[in-house]
Each structure stands twice: as structure tokens, then as C-alpha cells.
């Protein structure tokens, strides 16, 4: 049995001194007990519960510090409760066959308070799955079925009842997968999945991949798969409106469907204490029936969802590089992505999606004594509107760890050079009572330092 109990508190901060919080006031409490029971030599039962209570407040800093109501300035309150259970029972036989049953129940409730708006709702999600794994010769089969249900009940007292966001979804599915070791260097993986949703019908989801090991140093993989996403009102746009003016999903809106493929190579080179690993990936994804908001309705403060006539495509590549020499290690991760969405009748890069991102981490370690590191993150230019592009920026962090006999001291400083969006532009406009918040494309909190102490008894 294990049990984790945690409680976090944070007071509000107005980093850029504009009168509004950049970091909210919050209190988060989590209780997470787990139990593992070996019923016999081949049967294991595990069960866990997670309960999280989260309260947050932000907005006008003077109102927050001196007045708990909404009488003077803008204030937003969030209260969330999440109760999650996880059950798994597995049975393993001597020949490698395995039968697994999984169950998860998630109850989530949330209340949002902003001036003249109160949103309140409860969501219940249940997932059940049973699967069987069998190894026969060069094949490994996995088959099974699952049932997922998702329901939401709105209790908001100020929203019109005719625009209730209530829904109830049920999706049973069956799946079959075969992993085939065709030759010592070639393996194939194929699967098929069929889901049936009570509102949107049948979805057939194939997947295929082939892995070729050229040598113990070089391998390559090609994959193709299809997917879908059911319509939902819970988007970032609805969140920014505190769900005021949000309309339920129309019966004419259909789920998004997608297909994607990727090709990656894994290369290793080692000589003595020198090691180099390289993993480039090229990918392409296309989303059909993309769901977005109607721009003409947003101008009236109403959010209505619709399927766009054109698709959204994403293509690019990512490269991971690791170089180590004895205790000195360098990690490099570069991503280039072009995501084209809808802007009127033309395609353009989606907002708040930088084309280029680069992560660099350099660490040096002396075993049993200490470890130190330097991190640098580059974020490329982003669009926040069709004709408004943000500047690119770097953030840098340092970290250190000192190991003693009975305890470990850990410290790090993030965003050393205090890169903040507020240094480029004002993040909040309007008045104290009716502010207008701009899209967030860079850090707001500035320099952050952490110190941790780990004690061994």
C-alpha cells in the first residue's frame, strides 16, 4: 500500500505591476492512496483513489487583497473537485498469455465566478476495458473490447435553460492488434479498431507500422493511423468567456476525423566513453471537418461551433540528439512545424503555434556527490491574428543538486533573464472593472527560483 498526501498554496503576484495578477492565488490539496494485492502467483489486483480539491482567485490585485466580492474590480474565482478511481485486475499464465481488466471512474465538478457570470457543472466519465494478449510463434496478438461513457450536467443559475450544455455520450468499441516479427530485422504491427457512439455512429480506425533494424546502431520506422474527436463545447475560447454566451453543439456538427503518418530513424554511435544518439522524425497529419467558432457570432459575444469546409494540415519534423562524454551530457531537441488552419477563405498558420522550437540541456554529474545543468529554450515567432506576429525569444535556466549522506539539496532558477510578454506589450487593456486580456504567447511570471530538500531516513 502507498499513500501520497500533498497540499500547495500560492499567494497572488502582479509581476509587471499593471494592477492584475500574473500568478493567481491558489490552494490545492491532493490525497492519493493505492493498494496492490497479489491474489496468487499470476494474478494481481491494484486499486487507487485520487481526490483533488483546487480553489483559485485572480484578477484585479486590489480587489483580491482587500475585497472578496466583485464590487470594485474584476475578479475570477475557480473551484474544482476531482475524484478518480482506478482498478486493474490482471492474470498472467506461464506461456506468456495475459488477461487484463481495467476500470476508471472520474467525477469532476467546477464552479467559475466572474462579474455577472456564474458557471457550474458536473461531469462523470467511466471507462471499462478487457483485453487478452497471446504470443503464438512470431506473432503477438492483443484483442479486447471497451466501453466509455461521458455525461455532463450544468447547474449554472444564470445561464438560459434553453442553452443548457448538458450531454450524455456512450461509446463501446472492439479492437484487434497483431505484432509480427517477420524476420530478425523486420517487424510489422497492424491493428483495427471499431467504435460506435450513440450520437455520431460508427468509426473504423486502422493503424499500420513497419520497423526495420538495419543493425544494432541503425533502425527506421514508418507508421500510419486514423482517428476521430467528438465535438465538445469545452475549448479555450469558451474558457476565456467563462462559458457566457456559449451555445451547445448543434446536431449539424459532425466529429473531426484525421489521418496521419510519420517516419523516424534511430541512430546510435559509441566509442569508449563517447556516445551519440540521433532520432529525426518526419510527420504529416490532416484533420477533416475541423470544428471552429463562427466569427460573425463572436462579435456579438456568442460562441457557436461549426465544421469548416476546408481541412487543417500539420507537417514538419523533429530531431532529438544526445551526446555524452563520460559525465558530460548534451541534449538537443529541435522542432519545425507548419500547421495550416482556416482564416476566412484562405489557409494560414494557426495562431499561437510557433514554427520553430529548440530545447538545449547541458548537464555535468559527479556520481554520489553533485550534478549541475544549464537549459536554454527558443520559441519562434507566432501569429496572434492574421496580420499580427509576435517576436521570437529565448529563456534560460540553471539547476544544481548536491548529495549528502542523509539528504539531497536541489535548486534551480528558471527564466534567468526575466523574459516576459509584458516587456513587449501590455497584456491587459480596458478598465479595472471590464478588462480585456490579450492572447498569451510568452511567460508572465518572470524569474522563478525553487529549492527542495529530500531527506532519507
Image (cartoon, helix red, strand yellow):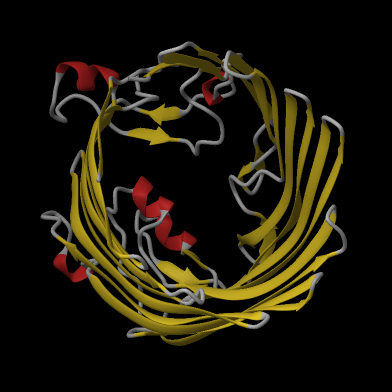
Camera-side residue of 36 and 291: 36
341 shown above or below 76 = below
**Is 400 placed left or right of 155 in the picture?**
right
* Residue at screen point 63% across, 74% down: 225
Residue 277 visible in the displayed image: yes
Residue 402 picture location, percent across and down: 53, 12
255 shown above or below 320 = below
86 shown above or below 407 = below
* Residue at screen point 33% across, 48% down: 241
Residue 40 picture location, percent across and down: 29, 66
* Residue at screen point 65% across, 41% down: 382
Q: Quadrant of residue 343?
A: bottom right
Q: What is the residue that sits farthest to the left in this orientation?
A: 157
Quadrant of the image for the C terminus?
top left
**Is 342 placed left or right of 327 in the picture?**
left
Q: What is the residue that sits farthest to the bottom in this orientation?
A: 202
374 shown above or below 136 = above
Q: Quadrant of residue 116?
A: top left
Q: Quadrant of residue 238?
A: bottom left
Residue 75 visible in the displayed image: no
Residue 190 picture location, percent across and down: 64, 80
Residue 132 picture location, percent across and down: 44, 79
Camera-side residue of 412 and 344: 412
* Residue at screen point 32% across, 27% down: 24
Count of marks overlaid on the render: 0
Camera-side residue of 403 and 410: 403
Amino acid at each position: 500500500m502507498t499513500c501520497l498526501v500533498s497540499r500547495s498554496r500560492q499567494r497572488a503576484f502582479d509581476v509587471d505591476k499593471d494592477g492584475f495578477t500574473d500568478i493567481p492565488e491558489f490552494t490545492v490539496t491532493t490525497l492519493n492512496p493505492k493498494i496492490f494485492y497479489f491474489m496468487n502467483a499470476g494474478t494481481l489486483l491494484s486499486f487507487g483513489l485520487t481526490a483533488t480539491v483546487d480553489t483559485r482567485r485572480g484578477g484585479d490585485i486590489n480587489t483580491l487583497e482587500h475585497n472578496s466580492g466583485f464590487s470594485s474590480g474584476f475578479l475570477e474565482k475557480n473551484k474544482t473537485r476531482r475524484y478518480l478511481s482506478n482498478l486493474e485486475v490482471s492474470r498472467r499464465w506461464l506461456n506468456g498469455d495475459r488477461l487484463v481488466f481495467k476500470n476508471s471512474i472520474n467525477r469532476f465538478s467546477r464552479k467559475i465566478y466572474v462579474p455577472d457570470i456564474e458557471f457550474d457543472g458536473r461531469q462523470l466519465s467511466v471507462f471499462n476495458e478487457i483485453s487478452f494478449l497471446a504470443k503464438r510463434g512470431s506473432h503477438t496478438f492483443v484483442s479486447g473490447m471497451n466501453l466509455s461513457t461521458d455525461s455532463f450536467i450544468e447547474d449554472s443559475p444564470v445561464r438560459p435553460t434553453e442553452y443548457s450544455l448538458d450531454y450524455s455520450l456512450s461509446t463501446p468499441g472492439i479492437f484487434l492488434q497483431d505484432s509480427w516479427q517477420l524476420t530478425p530485422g523486420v517487424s510489422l504491427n497492424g491493428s483495427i479498431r471499431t467504435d460506435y457512439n450513440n450520437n455520431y455512429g460508427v468509426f473504423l480506425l486502422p493503424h499500420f507500422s513497419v520497423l526495420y533494424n538495419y543493425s544494432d546502431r541503425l533502425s527506421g520506422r514508418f507508421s500510419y493511423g486514423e482517428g476521430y474527436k467528438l465535438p465538445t463545447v469545452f475549448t479555450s475560447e469558451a474558457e476565456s468567456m467563462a462559458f457566457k454566451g456559449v451555445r451547445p453543439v448543434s446536431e449539424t456538427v459532425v466529429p473531426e476525423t484525421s489521418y496521419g503518418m510519420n517516419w523516424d530513424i534511430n541512430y546510435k554511435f559509441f566509442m569508449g566513453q563517447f556516445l551519440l544518439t540521433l532520432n529525426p522524425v518526419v510527420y504529416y497529419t490532416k484533420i477533416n471537418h475541423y470544428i471552429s467558432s463562427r466569427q460573425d457570432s463572436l462579435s456579438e459575444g456568442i460562441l457557436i461551433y461549426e465544421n469548416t469546409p476546408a481541412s487543417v494540415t500539420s507537417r514538419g519534423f523533429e530531431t532529438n540528439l544526445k551526446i555524452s562524454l563520460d559525465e558530460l551530457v548534451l541534449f538537443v531537441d529541435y522542432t519545425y512545424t507548419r500547421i495550416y488552419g482556416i482564416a476566412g477563405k484562405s489557409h494560414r498558420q494557426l495562431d499561437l503555434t510557433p514554427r520553430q522550437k529548440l530545447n538545449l540541456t547541458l548537464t555535468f554529474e559527479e556520481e554520489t556527490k553533485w550534478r549541475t545543468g544549464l537549459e536554454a529554450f527558443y520559441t519562434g515567432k507566432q501569429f496572434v491574428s492574421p496580420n499580427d506576429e509576435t517576436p521570437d525569444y529565448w529563456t534560460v535556466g540553471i539547476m544544481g543538486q548536491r548529495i549528502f549522506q542523509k539528504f539531497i539539496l536541489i535548486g534551480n532558477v528558471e527564466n534567468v533573464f526575466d523574459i516576459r510578454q509584458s516587456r513587449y506589450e501590455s497584456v491587459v487593456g480596458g478598465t479595472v472593472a471590464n478588462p480585456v486580456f490579450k492572447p498569451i504567447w510568452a511567460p508572465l511570471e518572470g524569474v522563478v527560483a525553487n529549492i527542495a530538500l529530500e531527506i532519507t531516513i
